[in-house]
Image (spheres, helix red, strand yellow):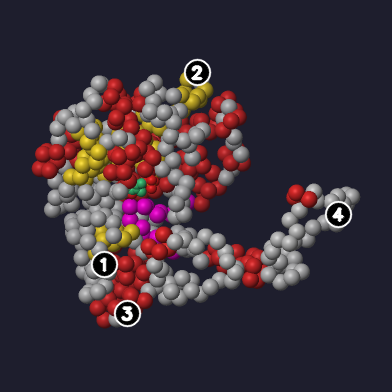
Amino acid sequence: MNLKEEPLLFELSSPGRVGASLPLCDVPAAPVPPELARDGLALPELDELGVVRHFTRLSQKNFSIDTQFYPLGSCTMKYNPKVNEQAASLPGWRNAHPLSGEEFNQGALELIHSLQEQLCEIGGFAAGSLQPAAGAQGELAGVLVMRAYHESRGDSKRRLVLVPDSAHGTNPATCTMAGYQAKTIPSDAEGGVDMAALAAALDETVAGIMITNPNTLGLFDRNIEAISRAVHGAGGLVYGDGANMNALAGVLRPAEVGIDVMHYNLHKTFSTPHGGGGPGAGFVGVRADLAGFLPGPIVARAEGAYALLMPARSIGRMKSFYGNFGILVRAYVYLRMLGAPGLRRVAETAVLNANYLKCLVEGAYKVKYPRRCMHEFVAQGDLAEGVHTLDVAKRLIDYGFHPPTIYFPLIVPEALMIEPTETESKETLDEFAAVLIRIAVEARERPELLHAAPTTTPVGRLDEVAAARNPTLCYRS
Ligand SMILES: *Cc1c(COP(=O)(O)O)cnc(C)c1O
């Protein structure tokens, strides 16, 4: 490991140096109560410039979408317009207190109500809830709705949920958390759901299917209507994982192809920065006869005012108060800025960008399912003997690019899952493709460059397993 260590604040300290200037004391000095006294604490002593430079340097060591391209497949690391941030930090929103009561929070409730309606319209759903705090929590809400639906009909023998083998890991985990058993359905040669395997799995023990379309291979499953018909025919419901709505919003309403319940990740499709792992928001939308089961409260309009309402047979709360409200403001602004035609262009451009990039690199990289992709595609990084996807990913860092998602989806060996998003320019895509092609040449001619990468970062190749298992969380001088 080649650690180019940044000194810690403690190590920059020099006795007597001060970075703050306080006004002269104009009240009588009082002794600090002994229980509050902290004499002898080894605090760093620095001047203001030293502190500013230290933290500014540290901030620049982080990778960010504000500085570089971030093609992390399945995550939609799109540009998040700064106007969203401005809107979310308006004092009226920022200082709103959830305990101040509905009558004083009418503006916030109106925003949530309008956002619920826009998101319902985008998916073709009759009703929706903004309670869930993330995609995975939206999934849990949706599958609990599915469960409540079957129970309300006295249908208690259904215990399986079908999950295609290309699914995100949260899908089978959600099934388990909701008290179901996940049953894997293989993909066919086209990368879609294997229809024969689906037919064979369907019976009266199946509660439904969780399907992602476009799936995590970035491929649109053309059999989606036949899949919905088959599942409905067996008495099951169709859950749509909407993490890939970036490819569909404004183009296709999932409810129209038979999706009964679906979540979207507002922090992926509807623009919120999420590189650090949160916060997020997961809208869940449903068809009309499932509306009563939605998690609540949701916002309703009655007698000229907005009010919080618990749906009649609600699965309950997922989150305190109004959910992650700041994220809802960002999604609202994003949608209002784009309008319906703008949203459609987002999806079209996301698909165009992914196909453009795929065409540029598919001569140098294998693509297991080479048909036209949607908003992302999955290439393979086994470029030469002894060279793996991990090496390609680390070498990209040397060239100033964030690596794509790697080793996912699991059904593609050595997967490199690339999602350019609609917000990147042709110049950036050309530059990224040129670097990928250059790395493919290096893999054959100078593989040691790939194995040593990254060499331009503060920390080199890490033992990621040890880093996760034995984290060093405390400073020891
Ligand atoms: C990101 C993602 C999820 C989980 O969403 P979170 O917001 O991270 O909880 C589920 N499914 C797919 C396909 C995803 O890409």
The mark that comes first in sequence, 1 or 2, is: 2
> In this view of the protein, can residue 211 be seen by the observer?
yes
Q: Which residue is the extreme one toward the top?
A: 303
Query: What x and y, as percent, mark residue 459?
Result: 46, 71
Q: Is mark 1 within 8 Å of ligand 1?
A: no
Instruction: In this rendered view, identify the residue nearer to me: 181 or 399.
Output: 181
Q: Is mark 3 within 8 Å of ligand 1?
A: no
- Callout 1 secondary element: loop
| CA distance for labels 3 and 2 | 71 Å
Please state which amino acid type lies under the numbered disc 2.
Glu
Q: Which residue is the extreme one toward the front?
A: 34
The mark that comes first in sequence, 4 or 3, is: 4
Density class for disc 1 (Cα within 10 Å; few <14, some 14-19, many ≥20) is many
- Callout 3 secondary element: helix
In the rendered image, which residue does mark 3 sit on?
A: 448
In the rendered image, which residue does mark 1 sit on?
A: 381
| CA distance for labels 1 and 4 | 65 Å
From the viewer's perspective, is residue 197 above or below residue 401?
above
Mark 4 and 3 residues: CB-CB less than 8 Å, in contact? no
Please state which amino acid type lies under the numbered disc 4.
Cys
| CA distance for labels 3 and 1 | 15 Å
Density class for disc 4 (Cα within 10 Å; few <14, some 14-19, many ≥20) is few
> In this view of the protein, can residue 253 be seen by the observer?
no
Left-right relation of 306 to 45: left
- Range shown magenta: 68-81
Please state which amino acid type lies under the numbered disc 3.
Glu
Q: Residue at x 41, y 68 (%)?
A: 462
Q: Which residue is the extreme one toward the bottom?
A: 445
